[in-house]
Image (spheres, rainbow, N blue to C red):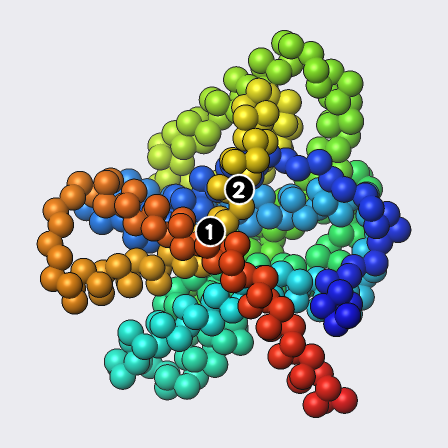
Amino acid sequence: MFLKHLQHINTNNKNLKRKTLHYIALMKFIAMIKIIKWHIYSWKKREFDYGARMCEFLFISSGFLVGYNYYERIMPCDYETSFKYTYKHLRTFYPLECFNIIYGFYRKHHKHFNLTELEILLSNFLMIKPWSRHTYLVQYFTGISWFLSDLLFCYFLVPFLLKGIKQIKKSLILFFIVSITRISIEEIIHNGGANIFDTDFHRGPFIRLLEFYLGMLLIPVFYLFKNNMDNFSKNYSLKIFFTFIQITFPPIIYYIMLKYNKKLYRCYFVMIFCVFIFIINNDYGYLSNIIAHKLCAKIMSCQMEMYLIQSTMNNIIHELKKKMKILIILNSEVKFLAKLIIIFIVGYLYKTLLKEKLANFMDKIILIFKKLLL
């Protein structure tokens, strides 16, 4: 009963279901793989910081999908709903993140830190690292918790952010304001005002909230466009056209990131991704039909688990090789592919066998605390 109560978000259209956007699911899966490669690949020279670009893409696309799922629903705008909605997401990954923290502590404790180990542990378990002015804190024990903390902050504000996407005119005005804010911050940082912000500001919750909200604010115009296009969704020429877009746009975006990496600030890539996400989310191409297959959906369904387990598994593999004194000389791409397959298998097994069980266990712990407090 408690679990159902926590997961329940009141809506006027309880049975209303959004059509799955298959192509953006593929793009998010690829973005996750690129981030994993950025972290565990044996780099000699990195062409550009595509790890940062993929994080920007993921926050914008996550905001877009949240807006898409709740655009025609009514979510109460209050803090109780915020806590319930946030916990609904937290319970799915927090147990695995706790494992990452414990393993990270096991590997790195007794090393010299600028903070005490207890302070670092608490900041990890409470998921408050990106709120700290200590920029070096982000890497201690687990380096990915900043992403989760920022995402939870965005989820917490979703009931309030949804009010801005109910009208096209209002959403356009807000999109302009948020865009100007995002660009202004970047311009200030790069034109002598860096001391105003934290040096690691881009891992902070505020900057990521702006990107998340930009994704949400695309929804009203997207629906206007989509409703007009749905009448022609089975048109052969339209399908060919959108298939062409789905195939050609990712290489074009990659080329833009590569060519203009040192010429454009992060904020301008954010705007490029907004345009990209707005266009690719129309699932009219034949490629979307292929991605919609159940096997493809299952493969892509464990992307968050892969993201969470990547560093831990990479370190475990490294430690096992050292202890077993295994010397395997492989091409960097082959080595990465082997690690990626292991990460995928572990992530998928965790999702199918342990994820819901541990989430339910976490519910029971929360229920015990709730009874103690009452």
- Kindly indicate whether the residue at mark 1 contacts the one at mark 2 (C-beta within 8 angstroms): yes
* Figure disc tally: 2
Disc 2 is placed on an element classified as helix
Percent x, y of residue 205: 55, 62
209 in relation to 256, above or below: below
Instruction: Tell which residue pokes out farthest to the top in this image.
Output: 237
Identify the residue at image location x=71%, y=42%: 68
Identify the residue at image location x=26%, y=59%: 317
Label number found at residue 281: none
Percent x, y of residue 324: 15, 63
69 in relation to 252, above or below: below
First reached walking from the N terminus: tag 2 or tag 1: 2
Disc 1 is placed on an element classified as helix
On-image quarter of the N terminus: bottom right
On-image quarter of the C terminus: bottom right
331 in relation to 100, above or below: above
Q: Which residue is mark 2?
A: 298
Residue placed most toward the observer, 274 or 11: 11
What residue type is disc 1 on?
Tyr
Q: Which residue is mark 1?
A: 348
Residue placed most toward the observer, 30 or 3: 3
68 to the left or right of 242 = right
